[in-house]
Amino acid sequence: MTENLLSHVVGFARVLRREGIRVTPGQTAAFARALGEISIFDPASFYYAAQTTLVNRHEDLPRFSLVFQRYWKELGMERFPGELLQQAPAPPKKDPRAKPGEVGREPQPKGPGEAPPQPLVDRALTYAPTEVLRQKRFDQMSEAELEAARKLLYHMAWSPPLRRTRRLGAHGREKIDLRKSLRQALRYQGEMVRLAWQARKRKPRPIVALADVSGSMERYARMLLHFLYAFSLAQARRGARRVETFTFGTRLTRITRTFQKKSVDAALAEVGREVKDWSGGTRIGACLHSFNHTWAKRVLGQGAVVLIISDGWDQGEPELLAFEMERLQKSCHRLIWLNPLLGTPSYQPLTRGLVAALPYVDDFLPVHNITSLEKLVKTLEQLEV
Amino acid sequence: MLPSSVEETQKALERYHYIADRGLSVAVFLALRLGRPLLLEGEPGVGKTEIVKVLAQVLSTRLIRLQCYEGLDINSAVYEWDYARQMLQIRLLEAVGERAQERIRQEVFGPDFLLKRPLLQALESQNGKPPVLLIDELDRADEEFEAFLLEFLSDWQITVPEVGTLKAEHPPVVVITSNRTREIHDALKRRCMYYWIDYPSFEKEYRIVREKVPGVPEKLAQQTVAFVQELRKQDLYKAPGVAETLDWAASLLALGQTELTLEAVEETLGALLKYQDDVLKARNQARDLLARAQAPTPL
């Protein structure tokens, strides 16, 4: 291969990386080797050789096609005919007018009065404010209190629900480990003096959360996203998969990848930019439909627990909602509906949406203050294995 | 014999009745030439498993298939000792007065008592030809197995503690498929050539039906494929794959149909759609879809 082509191969990989497609040096090397095997003057072979070596995620294909076209076109390689590139899937549409949202961004304290509370020295006094804070409803909190509540979230004790896997481990007595038993027996002239046992291992269940970010949920949504972020971190620390997180209002948006950011502020700011239906209307049925259709098979495997966080104000058809709820309940291990309004003393779940959805819900729980979130974590912990 | 070019790969696959896109042919050709595993993803029923079977025929070598499931462990994927025979052998040695522990151990953990499972079999070439190893539906296996596989795919060797390390003379041709019920780990993906098999175009699917369902009348094949293509545009829970199209065409043929009628569609939808909601939806729109399928096609 000529030096010139090689440098373009490396340059192309660099541009792909800049565009967010993860390409390792090993993959770049494979691409370079591949060019030695095919006829590089055949545009289709060239294109697919690049694609098969450099991309390994279906969702990256449209972006790859776009970058490919731009990069090699700019080099004046007009030999790549347009129809080849048109065969590749269309690039994702971007709305240039979309403004970055302000989700989760901490409002800067305007005056000294709104600064976060100073840590108190007196231990007797510190206890009481925390206790009050835990009971207080999120929508009645001041900015300073919200800040303190958020801190509590990140210090919560978590232990995710477990499930019995089909893999055997050395702890417990469910099945005889013949291999080990036999090896032990050899020490005693082939006499099975003691049997070795195995049992099915336990593993954290996958958690999938669908959070309502429509107008009626506005006062809670931010706090609950913090909760989900903290939960996701805790899952990762336990070696479990992160919480698969989606938001919905008028449409469904997956934010799991955004939530992998190191800093919660960066992650939530990006969620604000990605979620286009923030504080808009609600069409729960349609959003659940698109979840069931596109995501259910990919994220509900291995006995997932699904959390729907919503007040149930739905502008869509109740029949559709009931239909999709039934399907969702059948494809997950446990379906839990979290409703912040349940914390209001005289509240009755009578909205059309909730009446349609509730028959398919396994647990219906409040999420209006820290105490209720702690109870939720306890409930999850105690789900049957 | 490895194919020497992309065109040859495509033609060779076609000889065994597999119609492959240009992109898939490039991916297969490069996987063979560079000796890398090929990771195939796509909706169920688009021919992921089928191409591997054909590939084994093209290379005239044996196909070893490992079906993945949760909890798949070394005992079922790599090797296991034949415990029952080992126990008997120990008794036998005892009966002839063998007392030396080391001797017994060597005897009992010899190659005669080793049961080879797919991955170990895949290390063995026959007549100098490595086999094709199909690791089917890897997304069903758990992360522990994936980690093991990562090691296997980079070293092409397996260590059996009692015997030693077994290494492949020629690495096998490896194809991994996934239905994406779970994301495959990045580390594994990076070692592979990747290709996403899409639903075929009308022309391609028509060719597949003519190849795979011998005796299907031209008109029936055209209308069947056109109907399925229209059906895939509907909002279904599970759109029909190519496998379903073939089943359907074969069913219609068995019923003696020469062209698609509303009656025949309604009677045989079960071959095409596997969810009751989808069947109901399709039945409601059958007349409409049929009209579009009967319209003159570009062929």
Image: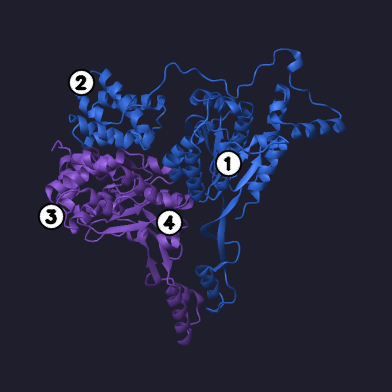
Chain colours: A blue, B purple
Secondary structure under the numbered disc 2 in the rendered image: loop
Residue under pointer 1: A355
Disc number placed over residue B69 in the picture, else none: 4
Mark 1–mark 4 Cα distance, whole angstroms, equals 39 Å
Q: Would you say A218 lies left or right of B151 here?
A: right
Secondary structure under the numbered disc 1 in the rendered image: helix
| Quarter in which the C terminus of chain A is drawn | bottom right
Mark 4–mark 3 Cα distance, whole angstroms, equals 38 Å
In this figure, what is the number of numbered marks? 4
Residue under pointer 3: B215
Q: Amino acid at mark 3?
A: Gly
Secondary structure under the numbered disc 3 in the rendered image: loop
> As rendered, which of B259 and A181 lies closer to the eye?
B259
Mark 4–mark 2 Cα distance, whole angstroms, equals 48 Å
Q: Are marks 4 and 3 in contact (CB under 8 Å)?
A: no
Disc number placed over residue A78 in the picture, else none: 2
Q: Are marks 1 and 4 in contact (CB under 8 Å)?
A: no
Q: Residue at x 72, y 28 (%)?
A: A148
Q: Are there few (<14), some (14-19), or many (20+) residues within 10 Å of tag 4?
A: some
Q: Are marks 2 and 3 in contact (CB under 8 Å)?
A: no
Task: Please tell me whether mark 1 or mark 4 is closer to you in this view.
Answer: 1
Q: Residue at x 44, y 60 (%)?
A: B74
Q: Are there few (<14), some (14-19), or many (20+) residues within 10 Å of tag 1?
A: few
Q: Is residue A344 above or below residue A327?
A: above
Q: Are there few (<14), some (14-19), or many (20+) residues within 10 Å of tag 2?
A: few
Residue B174 point in image, percent of width and height: 31, 50
Q: Amino acid at mark 1?
A: Val
